[in-house]
Image (cartoon, helix red, strand yellow):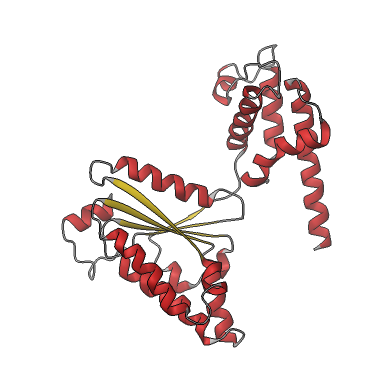
Amino acid sequence: MTTLLFSDKNVDSNIISWNRVVLLHGPPGTGKTSLCKALAQKLTIRLSSRYRYGQLVEINSHSLFSKWFSESGKLVTRMFQKIQDLIDDKEALVFVLIDEVESLTAARSACRAGAEPSDAIRVVNAVLTQIDQIKRHSNVVILTTSNITEKIDVAFVDRADIKQYIGPPSAAAIFKIYLSCLEELMKCQIIYPRQQLLTLRELEMIGFIENNVSKLSLLLSEISRKSQGLSGRVLRKLPFLAHALYIQAPTVTIEGFLQALSLAVDKQFEEKKKLSTHI
């Protein structure tokens, strides 16, 4: 909203600079890419009175080097020309999503070390130059993600207006993730019969006191607490693993499923420990 205001009021960008670049960084599987897409949708809705539609363009950094080796610079420019065509429609709000932006940095580092040909560094420079060119338009937002914070090039970090760390989900967030998974399995009648689970807010209202109504929700809350440290990607997979490893039946009661889920969480931490010791 501030970038739009500054653009509307013709604030001189040579005196006060803003780049319309957002960088979300943190460990893998924490939902950075999903959050970027959600942000694009949210802004499109919020600014619907100003822009008729939103457009999301996804760029995978790795593909810039694997596909565009010999003519990389030209192809990057051509790709950004297509983005420019979208931006030229002033009724469109355009979002450019660059996933794993640290791979651009890795290429520059490798070039300096002499491990990569100069063609690779041309790609990175071309991308950064194109970002600098399209940011001048008021109807574009550049959204980027990174898993390896320390690998991000300073040249890019300086371009980001907002640098936000996205960590693993909290116990409260995990509870909500599990609750949505259980609702889905009850809807599909894999968990049967359907039972009403309390939300965290409802549990707080009764002071987390155990009774017939709150018993299962409190168990889910306990499982959520011991799941802390797992990524969102793993959490979404756990209900499937719980069923595959410990149930293997067409239907299961919610009590049975929560027991299986608890075992699946324990197994996940065991596997993480084994992997880290082997590494």
- Image position, residue 40 (x, y; %): 40, 48
Q: Is residue 259 left or right of residue 41?
A: right
Up/down of 122 relative to 85, above or below:
below
Q: Is residue 66 left or right of residue 88?
A: right
Q: In the orientation shown, which residue stands out farthest toward the top? A: 212
Q: Is residue 226 visible?
A: no
Q: Is residue 116 left or right of residue 1?
A: right
Taking depth in this image into account, of 139 and 14 the one nearest to the observer is 139
- Residue 113 falls in image quadrant: bottom right
Q: How many marks?
A: 0
Residue under the point 77% across and 51% down: 272
Q: In the orientation shown, which residue stands out farthest toward the left? A: 9
- Image position, residue 125 (x, y; %): 43, 78
Residue under the point 34% across and 48% down: 54
- Image position, residue 21 (x, y; %): 38, 60
- Image position, residue 172 (x, y; %): 59, 34
Up/down of 254 relative to 38, above or below:
above
Residue under the point 78% across and 23% down: 256
Residue under the point 27% across and 65% down: 136
